[in-house]
Image (cartoon, rainbow, N blue to C red):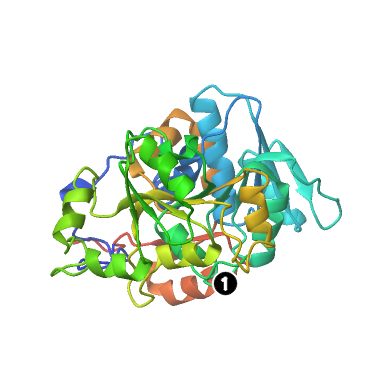
């Protein structure tokens, strides 16, 4: 609410699209229901990178979003009757105490304990810090899931934040990874863009799978995509025909030979939030180009030498969030007890914002918009 055309939600009554209204079951309190949006975002990360039986899953920086991911992991585990370990990693004992209450099986204070590299199958990085992301890359065996960034250039990527905004993945090139999709999504990835730095051998491998490949200058291809009236309309007739099998007028995948090319694919025009690849697509890194200045970064080594995958996600499905909370009332109660640290009447909304801005004082702050004097 309050993002596009409609007013915000800090009022006793708000106008909302009927399709956006979700019934809250009696098992979930109003206070817990107020956490639906952030919990849905946390659950989105879990379900887009689903742990398997026997996995060890770490959450790095379990403060606000990280704490919700711990609860989402526990809820996902319970609802799907899975057996994997949940580990919370933080430098703050107070956060670790809350983490234990929200679903962590193991807590690790990395201020006092030495961490083992390549120990965790999946690492959720919620620190929003470059050094946190580097630590996640060192700790992960299979997947780093990035949930929070700070807009800075990190590990050789200028547009890492934009990758998260578009919920994309960064993988090593392989024929298997050409089939990348989110769980529960059925897509064949028929169209693939290859940056100029990609070798002819890789292009032939892609074509041998029956996919259509375009290799061209990145900015030139972007100009063709956006030549029509609107940014979501393919302007070039040949390109429009090529991309017709895809759900959106963007490529399903892209292959890059350098991290510089990854950046250019993510944002060909830095003034526009448009990528060559559709949201929830992937960019595959190839090893056939020797001109990159970023090959010594930990990100490059992790993906190309250790075959680690970088995943990302943003907002989530409210219905799924409510379902998980309804199926796990214990988790719903824990969220209310341990995530909501302050509640203010609407008249004190300024104070609420002040407290919420200080993470040392609060986790989640609620504003009670109920009309105290109904007519």
Residue 221 drawn above or below residue 139? below
For the question of whether residue 320 can be seen, the reply is: yes
Q: Nearer the viewer, residue 267 or 319?
A: 267
Residue 298 drawn above or below residue 209? below
Q: Nearer the viewer, residue 125 or 188?
A: 188
Q: What percent of the width, then of the height, locates residue 61?
A: 65, 56
Query: In terms of secondary structure, where does tag 1 sit?
Result: loop
Q: Residue at x 82, y 58 (%)?
A: 111
Q: Residue furthest front?
A: 200
Q: Count up the numbered dots.
A: 1
The quadrant in which residue 374 appears is bottom left
Query: The C terminus is located in which quarter?
Result: bottom left
Q: Nearer the viewer, residue 228 or 51?
A: 228
Q: Residue at x 62, y 60 (%)?
A: 127
Q: What percent of the width, then of the height, locates residue 79?
A: 49, 26
Q: What percent of the width, then of the height, locates residue 257?
A: 52, 58
The residue under label 1 is: 153
Q: What percent of the width, then of the height, locates residue 248?
A: 24, 51
Mark 1 packing: few (<14 Cα in 10 Å), some, or many (20+)? few
For the question of whether residue 330 can be seen, the reply is: no
Q: Residue furthest top?
A: 81
Residue 125 drawn above or below residue 185? below
Query: The N terminus is located in which quarter?
Result: bottom left
């Amino acid at each position: 609410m309050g993002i596009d055309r409609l007013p915000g939600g800090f009022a006793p009554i708000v106008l909302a699209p009927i399709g956006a209204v979700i019934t809250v079951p009696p098992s979930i309190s109003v206070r817990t229901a107020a956490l639906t949006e952030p919990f849905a975002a946390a659950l989105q990360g879990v379900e887009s990178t689903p742990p398997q039986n026997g996995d060890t899953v770490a959450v790095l920086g379990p403060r606000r979003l990280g704490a919700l991911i711990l609860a989402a992991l526990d809820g996902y585990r319970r609802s799907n009757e899975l057996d994997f370990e949940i580990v919370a990693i933080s430098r703050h004992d107070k956060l670790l105490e809350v983490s234990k209450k929200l679903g962590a099986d193991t807590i690790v204070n990395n201020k006092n304990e030495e961490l083992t590299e390549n120990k965790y199958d999946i690492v959720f990085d919620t620190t929003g810090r470059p050094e946190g992301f580097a630590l996640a890359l060192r700790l992960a065996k299979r997947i780093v899931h990035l949930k929070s960034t700070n807009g800075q250039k990190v590990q050789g990527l200028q547009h890492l934040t934009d990758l998260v905004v578009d919920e994309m993945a960064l993988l090593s090139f392989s024929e298997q990874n050409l089939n990348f999709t989110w769980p529960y999504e059925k897509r064949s990835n028929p169209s693939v863009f290859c940056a100029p730095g990609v070798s002819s051998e890789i292009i032939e491998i892609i074509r041998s799978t029956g996919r259509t490949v375009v290799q061209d200058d990145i900015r030139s291809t972007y100009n063709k995509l956006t030549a029509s009236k609107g940014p979501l309309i393919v302007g070039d007739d040949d390109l429009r025909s090529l991309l017709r099998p895809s759900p959106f007028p963007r490529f399903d995948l892209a292959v890059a030979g350098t991290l510089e090319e990854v950046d250019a694919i993510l944002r060909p025009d830095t003034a526009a939030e448009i990528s060559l690849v559709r949201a929830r697509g992937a960019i595959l890194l190839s090893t056939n180009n020797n001109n990159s200045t970023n090959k010594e970064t930990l990100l490059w080594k992790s993906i190309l030498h250790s075959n680690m995958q970088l995943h990302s996600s943003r907002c989530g499905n409210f219905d799924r969030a409510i379902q998980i909370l309804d199926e796990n009332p214990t988790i719903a109660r824990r969220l209310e007890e341990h995530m909501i640290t302050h509640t203010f009447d609407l008249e004190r909304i300024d104070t609420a914002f002040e407290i919420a801005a200080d993470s040392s004082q609060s986790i989640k702050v609620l504003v009670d918009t109920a009309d105290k004097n109904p007519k």
